[in-house]
Amino acid sequence: MKKQTKIIIVMMISIIMMIVAIGVGHYFLKSGNVMEQIYTEARRNITAFNEIEALNNIQPIDMAQFENFGVLRVNFKEEYLRDGFDIYFRFPADMADNGIFGISGNLRLSEHTLLRIRINYNHQERTIIYEPISLAHRTGELFDEERVNKFLEDDWTMEEIEELQNTLTTDFHDAENIERLLLQYGITREDITEYQIYILYDVVMRTWIDTHGGNYEDERRKIENMNLIDNTFAFAR
């Protein structure tokens, strides 16, 4: 009887410890702002993947494309994501060292021109960084299936075809060309600011909260009260 009692007590203690552990884990995940929660979860997932020997040669930024990447594979719901936008996380290989991850937002202005918006989060300094915008402008048409097949028939590899296609695209990081193209498409600096707010708050934050819980207004207030470094228009000279 005493032995059974001891077993029951041990089981109860184990259950209590498990509940406490889950509660503590949930607290640490939900504490801090949404960006800190994403960083914490990214570190946990990346560390887990790095312990798998077969994946040693795969960078975390590549792993972010995998469907089985866990909760980091955030599904940006259609009601939040506008037409023309492509938004995704960037988890660089050295994130564990420098504490920085990013959000990329690409807005297609036309068939030939893409506006690139980058937002970084610095975990160590608890700072949001709006990186300089850039534009990618393609001077030629995308290769259609017929043309790609013709290259393949001539013994080109897909890598060689993609490299050739990329030579038709120019990335602009300087003030003169960026301002010229923004004017051409009627995009103002106020529009850029609205896009940044949309990406950070209306897509990433809302989707994360829908998935993991939290109050939108409270979480937005936390982010708005953080340090902000705005390099949006700090173009290369």
Image (cartoon, rainbow, N blue to C red):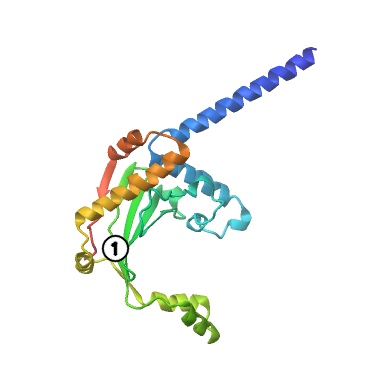
In the image, residue 171 above or below residue 83: below
In screen coordinates, is 24 left or right of 107?
right
Residue at 51%, 76% (x, y): give it: 158
Do we see residue 123 in this rendering? no
Image quadrant in which the N terminus is located = top right
Mark 1 — residue?
134
* Nearer to the camera, 104 or 108: 108
In the image, residue 45 above or below residue 26: below
In screen coordinates, is 207 left or right of 230?
right
Q: Residue at the front extreme? A: 79
* Nearer to the camera, 33 or 216: 216
**What crowding class fits label 1: few (fewer than 14 Cα within 10 Å), some (14-19), or many (20 or more)?**
many
Residue at 42%, 44% (x, y): give it: 207
Q: Residue at the top extreme? A: 1
Residue 95 location in percent, x, y?
44, 50
Residue 14 location in percent, x, y?
65, 24
Residue 202 found in image quarter: top left
Residue 37 location in percent, x, y?
43, 40
Residue 142 location in percent, x, y?
40, 75
Do we see residue 169 in this rendering? yes
In screen coordinates, is 162 left or right of 54?
left
In the image, residue 28 above or below residue 47: above
Residue 222 found in image quarter: top left
